Image: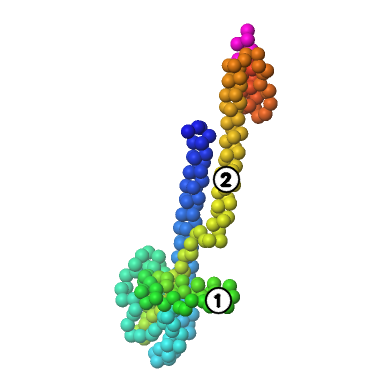
Amino acid sequence: QTLPVWVLLIVIAGLLISQVATLYIVSCDRAAANDVVDLYRLNDRAFSLVQLMSGATPEERKATAAGLFNSTYALTVSDTPAVTSSIAGDDELAELEDILVGRLSKFGITDARVRRDPATREADDAGGAAPGPDIGQVERDLLVLAADFAQSDKLTASLRFADGQWLNFTEPITPVGPILSIDSLPLYALIAGLVVIMSIWSLRRLTAPYRMMETAVNRIGNDLKSPPVTESGSREVRAAARAINAMQKRLRE
């Protein structure tokens, strides 16, 4: 294979590697950002629920929890914690537990426990009915997002009031959408095509002196009296043309 072909293959391989690396970095950054947002949402929801129930009696708390309960955002009040272990699963959750206790202690919260739970099979099967053909795009997107949240992993939190009662609730983890979608594939293909076209054009410009030298040497080999090569074009092309003309002049002498 010729040198231009090898260079083109290297450029295409470099393009693919750079795009894959970029997508991987973006995916990691999105996952890290989602983790922070999920912890913030749990912290904010814990504050709202505790503020709502702090002055209520145990029976009133149970009634409030029953009214706010749903399959995606489970909420119960009981005498036992949903998170039985007092040891956090990782440093992030341990720090979040300390933040919750410090922030909610004024409402009588004495202990906080948080854990990550994987999606259950029941949640996987509870995707809901398929959207009908007559709904709008916004409603369709909302239904798809709700189904994704219902099937995602969850953060489970248990907060203990001063009277020993536990507030247990779950917060779905934000599902990470795909980096590439059907709508974005044409754009990626267009960019890749433009890069390949520009690479081919650049390679032809770079290899023009070699092609010119090959043609000129073959012509001189057949006829020493052939006209000299025109010294025009880029600096490299002019330099190659001058060298060929000088060689032809010496051969004539």
- Where is residue 202 shown, x and y percent of the image? 59, 37
Image quadrant of residue 247? Answer: top right
Q: Which amino acid does label 2 sit on?
A: Val
Write the residue at 58% across / 78% down. 134
Work out which quarter of the rendered image holds the C terminus and state it.
top right
Q: What residue type is labelled 1?
A: Pro
- In this orientation, which residue lies closer to the viewer: 59 or 187? 187
Q: Is mark 2 on a helix, strand or loop?
A: helix
Q: Position of residue 53 (x, y in %)?
A: 45, 85
Display colour scheme: rainbow
Q: Mark 2 points at which residue?
A: 195
Residue at label 1? 133
Residue 81 image point, x, y percent: 34, 80
Residue 249 on the magenta span:
yes
> Magenta span has 89?
no
Question: How far is disc 1 from disc 2 in space, using C-alphas?
Answer: 40 Å
Mark 2, Cα crowd under 10 Å, few <14 / some 14-19 / many 20+, is some
**Residue 162 visible, this orientation:** no
Along the viewing direction, whichever of 226 and 251 lies nearer the viewer: 226
- From which residue to which does the magenta span run? 247-253
Is any part of residue 147 visible from this angle?
Answer: yes
Q: Which residue is drawn at 51% across and 59% down?
A: 180
